[in-house]
Image (cartoon, rainbow, N blue to C red):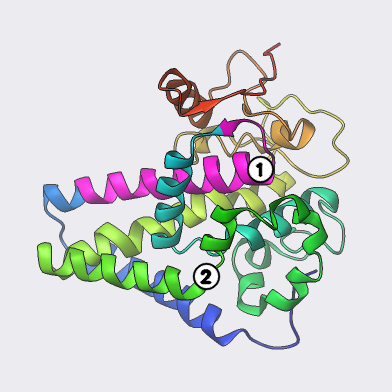
């Protein structure tokens, strides 16, 4: 797994800032309607960067995407502090290959808190890059090379925070950047990586397939996660752009992909037919 021998200080400080900054925003700041609108728009932008660009496009190549949309979503991913898309792909493909085994970096078999966020406090980039063969198809990708620049990510994040501060106020920084970044990170990645592999959340609505792991669907989370919480379906057929396999399931991420396909921004969608 991708865990170092000691605490990753930069990661730990960043995560602690987002945790306590989000709590500060919720309990001590009162946003205006304009700032709430910024929160919603930013949450959607970061969530789609995670779910559509990093996950369904780069990690699984389940459709083709126009370069304009790729760079627009990458900008959101970098401002949203999602990190290197190259490392994301390696970690995600490794997770699929070793789902819920002892080497799975974020399986709740150790404990739920570890799977949700604690493992990132000990994240070791060098150990991730030892498995770069998992993303060999992306080594010469220009988008990946741009997104793999931590200085660029920090710079964009700081400039966007300054833009919000001078255009609005400090409340806009916390409600328009810090809070949506953390909530999107939770509902579109870490809650999926942890809760969607924790069988205590087993739902009667889930139709289980033989995936060889503990993945499951959490239907009440589909709106906030843009369909990412239909996770068991995804583990069953990871190469498809849609995660809704049953008629009663709704994958909001795929609905957006279908809208984007009408604008010719995505195409060649690999679709799993509903049963």
Q: Nearer the viewer, residue 160 or 265?
A: 265
Q: Nearer the viewer, residue 118 or 97?
A: 97
Q: Secondary structure at mark 2?
A: loop
Which residue occupies 85% across, 36% down?
Answer: 211
- Image height of 249 relative to 182, above or below: above
Q: Residues within 10 Å of mark 2 (few under 14, many from 20)?
A: some
Q: Position of residue 184 (x, y in %)?
A: 44, 52
Q: Is residue 264 visible?
A: yes
Q: Which residue is mark 2?
A: 149
Q: Secondary structure at mark 1?
A: helix
Q: Nearer the viewer, residue 14 or 186?
A: 14
Which residue occupies 63% across, 53% down?
Answer: 141
Image quadrant where one finds the N terminus: bottom right
Tell whether label 1 touches label 2 (CB within 8 Å): no
Q: Assess whether residue 264 is covered by the magenta stretch.
A: no
Distance (Cα) linking label 2 and label 1? 37 Å
Q: Quadrant of residue 207?
A: top right
Left or right, 96 with respect to 265, comes to: right
Q: Main secondary structure of the magenta part?
A: helix
Which residue occupies 82% across, 28% down?
Answer: 209
- Image height of 234 relative to 133, above or below: above
Of the two numbered discs 2 and 1 in the rendering, the one whose residue sits closer to the viewer: 2
Q: Which residue is mark 1?
A: 201
Image quadrant where one finds the C terminus: top right
Q: Position of residue 99 (x, y in %)?
A: 81, 51
Which residue occupies 62% across, 26% down?
Answer: 242
Which is nearer the N-term, disc 2 or disc 1?
2
Boundaries of the magenta span: 37-64
Q: Position of residue 98 (x, y in %)?
A: 85, 53
Left or right, 82 with respect to 41, comes to: right
């Amino acid at each position: 797994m991708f865990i170092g021998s000691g605490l990753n200080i930069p990661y730990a400080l960043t995560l602690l800032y987002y945790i306590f900054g989000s709590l500060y925003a919720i309990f001590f700041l009162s946003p205006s309607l304009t700032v709430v609108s910024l929160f919603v728009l930013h949450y959607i932008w970061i969530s789609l960067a995670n779910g559509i660009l990093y996950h369904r496009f780069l990690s699984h190549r389940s459709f083709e995407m126009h370069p304009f949309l790729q760079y627009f979503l990458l900008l959101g991913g970098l401002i949203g502090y999602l990190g290197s898309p190259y490392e994301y792909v390696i970690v995600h493909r490794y997770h699929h290959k070793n789902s819920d085994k002892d080497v799975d970096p974020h399986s709740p078999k150790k404990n739920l808190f570890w799977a949700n966020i604690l493992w990132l406090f000990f994240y070791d980039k060098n150990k991730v890059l030892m498995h770069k063969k998992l993303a060999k198809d992306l080594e010469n990708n220009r988008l990946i090379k741009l997104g793999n620049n931590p200085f660029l990510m920090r710079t964009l994040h700081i400039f966007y925070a300054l833009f919000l501060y001078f255009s609005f106020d400090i409340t806009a920084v916390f409600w328009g950047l810090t809070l949506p970044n953390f909530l999107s990170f939770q509902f579109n990645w870490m809650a999926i990586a942890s809760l969607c592999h924790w069988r205590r959340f087993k739902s009667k609505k889930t139709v289980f397939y033989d995936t060889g792991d503990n993945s499951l669907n959490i239907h009440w989370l589909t709106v906030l996660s843009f369909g990412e919480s239909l996770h068991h379906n995804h583990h069953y057929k990871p190469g498809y752009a849609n995660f809704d396999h049953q008629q009663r399931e709704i994958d909001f991420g795929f609905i957006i992909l279908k809208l984007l396909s009408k604008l010719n921004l995505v195409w060649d969608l690999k679709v799993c037919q509903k049963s």
